[in-house]
Amino acid sequence: MFEDLALGEGFFTSCLLVISSRWKVFALLNLLFFSCVFIAVLLASFLFPPVLFSGRRPAVPEVFLANWLTMILGIFVFNLVVSAFVVVTLPGFVFFPLSAVFLAYRAVLWGLLIYGLPTWLFLAALPTLFLEGEAYVFAAAAGTIAGVSWLKPDRIYRGEALGRVEAFKKALKEGLKIYVFVIVLLFVAAVVETATLILC
């Protein structure tokens, strides 16, 4: 039992080491994402007329409200598989800037959605927006690192004489460790979003 705990701690420590060794990538992607959200909201406030609200709560299908566990799992699986992996990470495998491009595109869409929310709903949704946004930043980092690894292995792994295949394999292992944080963040975000939709 103690050996299992030690292995778990070792794995988590190795995940943290990947994040700390790539802090510049995470910092740049965070700056890109959250500044794009802010700019989109700002531009929308100048370009679009003010949104009027009827005071009605957001529509949520009754099947989800009846079974909150289904709602949590549905949100989590969709965000993990489609929103994080397929839309943000996978394009970076092909050409590394695409992860950042799709991350910025998602940020602009979020900014336009935020602009249309009343203040009370924006404040209620803020924790979910932050958690999901950070998860997509991590997903974009995994795609970017994998994309750079096969394109310029000497750039991403300086001091290591790795070929493209070896560098890509190493980047995939890093990506799996980064995805531990993506999974945790998206699961917490799904729980928070479900609670927000049920309580609001």
Image (cartoon, grey):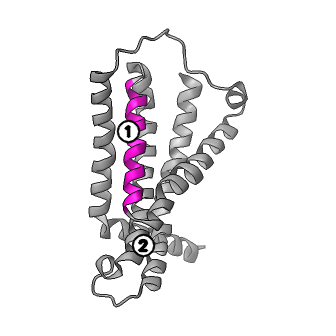
Question: How many C-alpha atoms fall within 10 Å of the one at disc 2: few (<14), some, or many (≥20)?
Answer: some
In the rendered view, tell whether residue 114 sits above or below residue 167: above
Q: What's under tag 2, amino acid-wise?
A: Ser
Residue drawn at (34%, 78%) of the image: 152
**Residue 108's mark?**
1
Q: Assess whether residue 106 is covered by the magenta stretch.
A: yes
Instruction: Spot the residue most to the bottom.
Output: 161
- Tag count: 2
Q: Secondary structure at mark 1?
A: helix
**Label at residue 5:** none
Of helix, strand and loop, which mostly describes the magenta segment? Answer: helix
Measuring from the top left, give residue 101's x and y in whole percent.
38, 52
Residue furthest to the top in view is 54
Tag 2–tag 1 contact (CB < 8 Å): no
Which residue appears at 51% of the width and 48% of the height? Answer: 186
Q: Is residue 30 left or right of residue 5?
A: left
Q: Amino acid at mark 1?
A: Val
Mark toward the start of the polypeptide (2 vs 1): 2
Q: Quadrant of residue 58?
A: top right
Residue segment shown in magenta = 97-115
Image point (36%, 71%), residue name: 17
Q: Spatial distance from mark 2 to mark 1, Cα to Cα?
A: 33 Å
**Residue 180 appears in the figure:** no
Where does residue 93 sit, x and y in percent of width and height? 47, 67
Locate residue 72: give its quadrant: top right
Residue 66 spot, x, y in % from top left: 72, 28
Q: Is residue 166 magenta?
A: no
Does residue 184 sit above or below 165 in this rendering? above
Relative to residue 2, is residue 143 drawn left or right? left
- Reading the image, the residue beneath label 2 is 14
Q: Is residue 51 visible?
A: yes
Nearer the observer: mark 2 or 1; the answer is 1
